[in-house]
């Protein structure tokens, strides 16, 4: 693989992203994502601010709530964006594109990344890009045509790939997968080809996974980087929230976790990645400073078993932290056990983990394929 490291400024200089950004974008209300929601910002009404956001090394949210929320209302969940340019640069480096390559992109979005791919593979190459949302796909086609790029943009389910143009030299996803990589991507990549995708668990949203396909349907690779992407719609997290009657039956205990242990447990480049591997189907929600500085709330839930846990993390209090748990799984206890495992194994970061995929299994290992940490065969996607 190439050792080149692309500067994101070079990408914007080569292919400006402004022509690909719609006139209406969405910005955090009060800068507090997930708590206050998102509001629409119009290029027509706020041109300078719009241009500042588009020029910055930050993602630009172009759709919320899968298009159900319209201008004037508050949006709650980003569902499409133009990715952070520095992250795009890192993914393109990992993809190791060459002129003449055939590339499948999962998640067209604004079309900016498809334009970059088209530029890099040149006139002898081919780019196929799949977008699940028809409105977003049409907007991308218009922007690509207006800027002189001509990848094939398909409206469809990216998890299924696009076999009509397979095999591909490269597959890149701009949407994260949860737990497993869709097998159609592997079947549609030629041997020695590469797949680059954000990968995460219900607990930990994401790192980058680079896989080299070995034979049809099989691949091996490693995790690297720390990045959060919106998920394939079929891989969205599922949430379980108990009602007040159920909460009355929760088991109340205390925990020894305190101080920096709390932050290590929620940080993906520290223990968070490992906990996500070892505590499957546990969706993590954290509200930092919910009740004041250093007074946080952490919740874990598993919709499959209707298990739930809540930690009242008042980190500056001398009192033990209180935990509520209910359901057949004791999710907080599982998370603490996984944290202890991480600590006992020399606190591995995501770069020490890798994945091996066959037609029947997807296993995650530590340091070498012989040390399996998670077998994804029986996980529900």
Image (cartoon, helix red, strand yellow):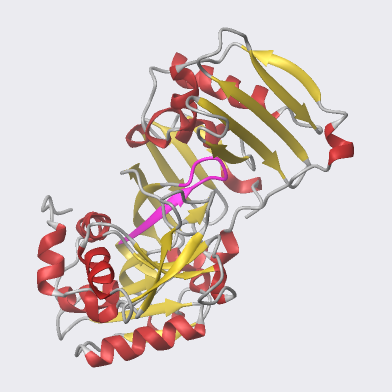
Task: Identify the magenta region.
Answer: 194-205
Q: Is residue 164 visible?
A: no
The image quarter containing residue 93 is: bottom left
Q: Is residue 194 visible?
A: yes
Q: Looking at the picture, does residue 20 appear above or below residue 169?
A: below
Give x and y (percent) for residue 197.
Answer: 38, 57
Position of 345 compared to 284: left or right? left
Position of 267 compared to 318: left or right? left
The image quarter containing residue 118 is: bottom left
Q: Residue at x 48, y 61 (%)?
A: 38
Position of 10 compared to 345: left or right? left
Q: Quadrant of the C terminus?
A: bottom right
Q: Looking at the picture, does residue 232 appear above or below residue 44?
A: above
Q: Looking at the picture, does residue 381 appear above or below residue 356?
A: below
The image quarter containing residue 85 is: bottom left
Q: Residue furthest front?
A: 45
Give x and y (percent) for residue 285.
Answer: 58, 41
Q: How many marks?
A: 0
305 inside magenta stretch: no
Q: Residue at x 36, y 43 (%)?
A: 223
Give x and y (percent) for residue 91.
Answer: 27, 57
The residue nearer to you, when weighing 311 against 75, is 75
Q: Residue at x 45, y 28 (%)?
A: 271
Q: Looking at the picture, does residue 222 appear above or below residue 352?
A: below
Give x and y (percent) for residue 102.
Answer: 27, 76
Q: Residue furthest top?
A: 318
Position of 27 compared to 337: left or right? left
């Amino acid at each position: 693989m190439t050792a080149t490291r692309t500067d994101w400024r070079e990408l914007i200089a080569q292919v400006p992203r402004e022509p690909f950004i719609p006139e209406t974008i969405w910005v955090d209300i009060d800068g507090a994502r997930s708590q206050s929601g998102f509001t629409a910002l119009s290029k027509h009404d706020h041109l300078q601010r719009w241009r500042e956001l588009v020029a910055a090394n930050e993602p630009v949210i172009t759709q919320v709530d899968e298009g159900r929320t319209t201008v004037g209302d508050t949006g709650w969940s980003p569902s499409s964006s133009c990715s952070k340019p520095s992250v795009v640069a890192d993914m393109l480096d990992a993809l190791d594109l060459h002129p003449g390559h055939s590339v499948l992109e999962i998640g067209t979005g604004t079309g900016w990344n498809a334009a970059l791919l088209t530029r890099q593979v040149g006139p002898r190459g081919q780019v196929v890009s799949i977008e699940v949302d028809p409105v977003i796909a049409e907007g991308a086609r218009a922007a690509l045509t207006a800027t002189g790029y001509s990848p094939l943009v398909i409206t469809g389910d990216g998890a299924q790939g696009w076999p009509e143009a397979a095999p591909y030299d490269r597959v890149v996803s701009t949407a994260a997968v949860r737990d497993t990589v869709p097998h159609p991507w592997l079947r549609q990549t030629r041997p020695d080809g590469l797949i680059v995708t954000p990968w995460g668990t219900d607990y930990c949203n994401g790192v980058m996974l680079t896989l080299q396909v070995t034979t049809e349907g099989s691949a091996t690779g490693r995790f690297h980087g720390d990045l959060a992407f919106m998920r394939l719609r079929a891989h969205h997290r599922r949430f379980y929230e108990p009602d007040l009657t159920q909460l009355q039956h929760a088991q109340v205990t205390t925990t020894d976790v305190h101080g920096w242990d709390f932050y290590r447990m929620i940080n993906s480049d520290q223990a968070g990645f490992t906990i996500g591997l070892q505590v499957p189907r546990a969706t993590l929600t954290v509200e930092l400073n919910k009740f004041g500085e250093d007074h946080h709330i952490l919740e874990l839930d598993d919709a499959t078993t209707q298990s739930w846990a809540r930690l009242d993390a008042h980190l500056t209090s001398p009192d033990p932290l209180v935990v509520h748990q209910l359901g057949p799984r004791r999710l907080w206890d599982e998370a603490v056990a996984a944290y202890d495992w991480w600590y006992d194994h020399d606190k591995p970061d995501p770069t020490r983990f890798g994945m091996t995929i066959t037609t029947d299994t997807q296993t995650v290992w530590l340091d070498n394929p012989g040390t399996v940490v998670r077998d994804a065969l029986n996980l529900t996607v």
